Image (cartoon, grey):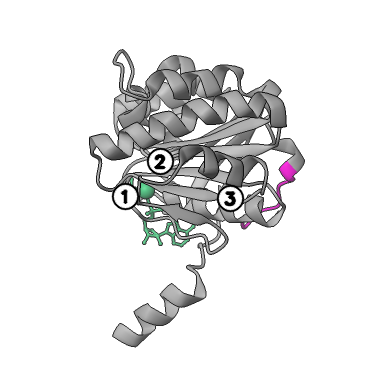
Amino acid sequence: MDLGFPLSSSELVRKCIAILGIRGSGKSNTAKVLGKELIREGFPLIVIDPDGEYDFQEALRIDNFNLDPEFAVKDVLERKRSIIIDMNEWNDEAFNFLFKFLDIFWNLSKKYKANVFLVLEEAHEFIPQGERTKISEEITRVALRGRKRGIGMIMISQRSARVNKDVLTQSEIYFLHKVVHPVDFKVYREILPLKAREVSDTVKSLDVGEALFYMNGRVEKVKIRKYEESAGNTEAVENLA
Ligand SMILES: Nc1ncnc2c1ncn2[C@@H]1O[C@H](COP(=O)(O)OP(=O)(O)OP(=O)(O)O)[C@@H](O)[C@H]1O
Ligand SMILES: [Mg+2]
């Protein structure tokens, strides 16, 4: 696949991938480019989207939580269709749906063992360090035990130090975008096999869309390409301009 740099999807299946960095550093753009390429190569995604910003044309967007969660799970596992769970409303109804969905997904994934990816935006909100949320146990289970069931995870956060450590440290692949705060440098230093000074110097100099890509013990500075919004949206924006 082409992310602006080449990467093989076979390296990613069933793995946990973390995308970290400050606000506006390009995390969601990276996740969208990566997600779109995975869909193209036949891997369905389940996107937990708290800001309603994901728009993959191939995906079913769920923002009406009267839908049968089992039907949605089977859409992914059986019909290989990606789904976006719109958590924009952030209410009990949305969380109840998400909880049921994740529970059924976990149970059925044992039977299907389909290679899918769970994309978790603003991961610190759902799996905060030292705190429980309505779905933190469900997500933790997927991160810790999902590999055998075919499940990979892509977690995204601007607050790396606030993401549950047990989950974050399951990651084998990292896109480390720019950070500035000492707390975040500390997290990066724990991840990267580089000298402390080297970490802060390189990370400070990263531009939007650039990241340190870490996989298999190797660190590489990469530039991720810009995500192309779907045709419909681009047109709408152009019409406004
Ligand atoms: N690789 C890139 N090439 C060009 N523009 C980019 C790239 N990555 C991000 N941008 C642009 O920078 C802006 C911020 O990117 P993005 O929304 O991905 O940041 P973020 O890290 O997810 O921020 P937040 O923490 O607020 O969610 C967007 O307008 C986006 O289009
Ligand atoms: Mg974002």
Secondary structure category for the residue under label 2 = loop
Mark 3: secondary structure: helix
Q: Is mark 3 within 8 Å of ligand 1?
A: no
- In the picture, measured across the screen, residue 13 lies left or right of residue 174, that is right
Tell me the tag on residue 51.
1
Q: Amino acid at mark 3?
A: Leu
Secondary structure mostly seen in magenta is loop
The one nearer the camera, 78 or 68, is: 68
Name which residue type carries label 2: Glu
Q: Is mark 1 within 8 Å of ligand 2?
A: yes
Residue at image point 53% right, 56% down: 59
Residue at the spot of label 3? 34
Q: CA distance from mark 3 to mark 2?
A: 13 Å
Residue range in magenta is 3-9
Q: Which of 107/20 is in front?
A: 107
Q: Earlier in the sequence, mark 3 or mark 1?
A: 3
Residue position for label 2: 121
